[in-house]
């Protein structure tokens, strides 16, 4: 079996866990606290970043970019009925796949910088460290929340014009976006009541079987928001 | 002809310019100052990020990730001798391509956050804005230079063990790394004398035909280091 080194609230790890579940690939999960910079972990991935997918009898794939593209290169296996049954992470033709990647980049780059990374840093990572500071900075949180509203508007706009974020088909862009939102939602920071269309899109993802392990996650010392695992939130 | 919206010292734009030149794809260059947030540019790429490759009669591809993977999906055209003659940005088999992508991520993610973005922000972007502050912060520059030395060691390590950074073949990892280093080198910040192996690797790239337009770049108000365009530096 493959092994996925991850951290429960890490949005990149979650995106890959969702992709693996959609692809019906079972993995053993090993948790890592990346901020501890353990030498054994740095030997696995010198960048010190999550996730790392150790292929059984094969290479260790480092980071969400290398892992997602590696999984997408899986040769579709034909079923008895002759249909290719692998979920395409990057569906469609070249321009469509470029649109999926633009949005993956949006969430793993821009959304992460402006929301997820800052929020996790301030509300989770900093508090799990020894000698952590007390309460989060109120002005800082206010700025992140303003960023989040801007991104929620963009998700609503996309979900209002398309079946899934990148077009007609479910893609890795939806999984990446949902992974970030799920981490933010764990902390109770998503103002769902203001973004009804985005909420409907997220509810469709949340009710998929692949989402179950994500919703079962609990981080010691940081309990999830009350509605976090509720499919009817 | 395709159109590439870029900024001369933007490392992501440079990586794509290098890839296009290696692929022998001619483009019209249009310069954009991304920090100006022009509405026309945001209409092209809502993320406000460079580069954008407008395919003639086709889609606008946003960001280095979407553009590089789109270019890599180009079907190799067979020559008269029956050989596939397209330079593979991600050469080799799946694990090898994952290694290329790990390193692309290293440079476009980690190296950018820890060196290029900070350096360009402090020494170029901030100074091209109206009402720019005076001299750069000395302590801040010292920290960035320490980061750069760490990355130079890693490049030296890779270049000492492999023909190119990701393995036997030239790949987009080399182009991405060289793009970042070239922007940093424009500012005269690379301590080449301390990293002889990395210097030999960079010199091999610098002497390629694809590098010429990069070396001809001049940014108003920020002249390049004396050795910048020198192939025998």
Image (cartoon, coloured by chain):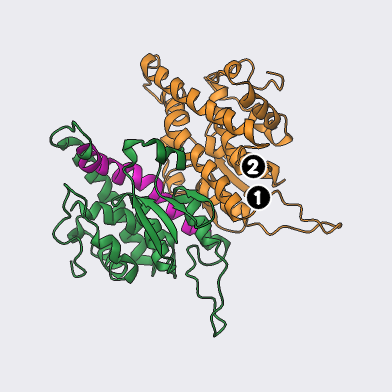
Chain colours: A green, B orange
In terms of secondary structure, where does tag 1 sit?
loop
Which of the 4 image quadrants contains residue A20? bottom left
Q: Which residue in the protein does label 2 denote?
A: B167
Image: B152 above or below B97: above
Q: Which residue in the protein does label 1 denote?
A: B91
- Marks 2 and 1: CB-CB under 8 Å? yes
Counting residues from the start of the chain, the first of labels 2 and 1 encountered is 1
The residue sitting at 47% across, 63% down in the picture is A89
Between B143 and B217, which is closer to the camera in this rendering? B143
- From the viewer's perspective, is the residue at label 2 or at label 1 nearer? 2
Residue B185 visible somewhere in the drawing: yes
Quarter of the figure that contains the C terminus of chain A: bottom left
The residue sitting at 42% across, 69% down in the picture is A24
Counting from the top left corner in percent of width and height, residue B130 is at 39, 24
Quarter of the figure that contains the N terminus of chain A: bottom left
The main secondary structure of the magenta stretch is: helix
Q: Is residue A121 magenta?
A: yes
- In the image, which residues are magenta? A98-127
- Distance between the alpha carbons at the discs numbered 2 and 1: 9 Å
| Pointer 2 local density, CA inside 10 Å: few below 14, some 14–19, many at least 20 | some
Counting from the top left corner in percent of width and height, residue A123 is at 20, 42
Q: How many marks?
A: 2
Between A39 and B124, which is closer to the camera in this rendering? A39
């Amino acid at each position: 079996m493959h092994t996925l080194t991850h951290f429960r609230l890490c949005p990149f790890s979650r995106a890959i866990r969702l992709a693996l579940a959609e692809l019906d690939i079972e993995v053993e999960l090993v948790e890592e606290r990346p901020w501890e910079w353990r030498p054994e972990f740095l030997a696995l991935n010198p960048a010190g970043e999550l996730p790392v997918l150790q292929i059984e009898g094969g290479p260790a794939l480092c980071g969400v970019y290398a892992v997602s593209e590696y999984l997408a290169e899986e040769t579709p296996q034909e079923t008895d009925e002759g249909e290719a049954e692998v979920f395409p992470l990057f569906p469609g033709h070249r321009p469509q796949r470029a649109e999926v990647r633009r949005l993956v980049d949006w969430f793993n780059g821009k959304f992460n910088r402006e929301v997820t990374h800052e929020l996790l840093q301030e509300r989770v990572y900093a508090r799990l460290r020894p000698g952590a500071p007390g309460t989060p900075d109120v002005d800082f949180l206010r700025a992140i929340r303003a960023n989040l509203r801007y991104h929620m508007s963009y998700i609503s706009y996309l979900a209002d014009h398309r079946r899934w974020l990148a077009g007609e088909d479910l893609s890795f862009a939806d999984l990446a976006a949902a992974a970030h939102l799920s981490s933010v939602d764990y902390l109770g920071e998503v103002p769902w009541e203001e973004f009804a269309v985005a909420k409907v899109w997220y509810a469709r993802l949340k009710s998929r079987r692949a989402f179950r392990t994500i919703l079962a996650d609990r981080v010691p010392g940081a309990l999830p928001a009350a509605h976090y695992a509720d499919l009817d939130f």
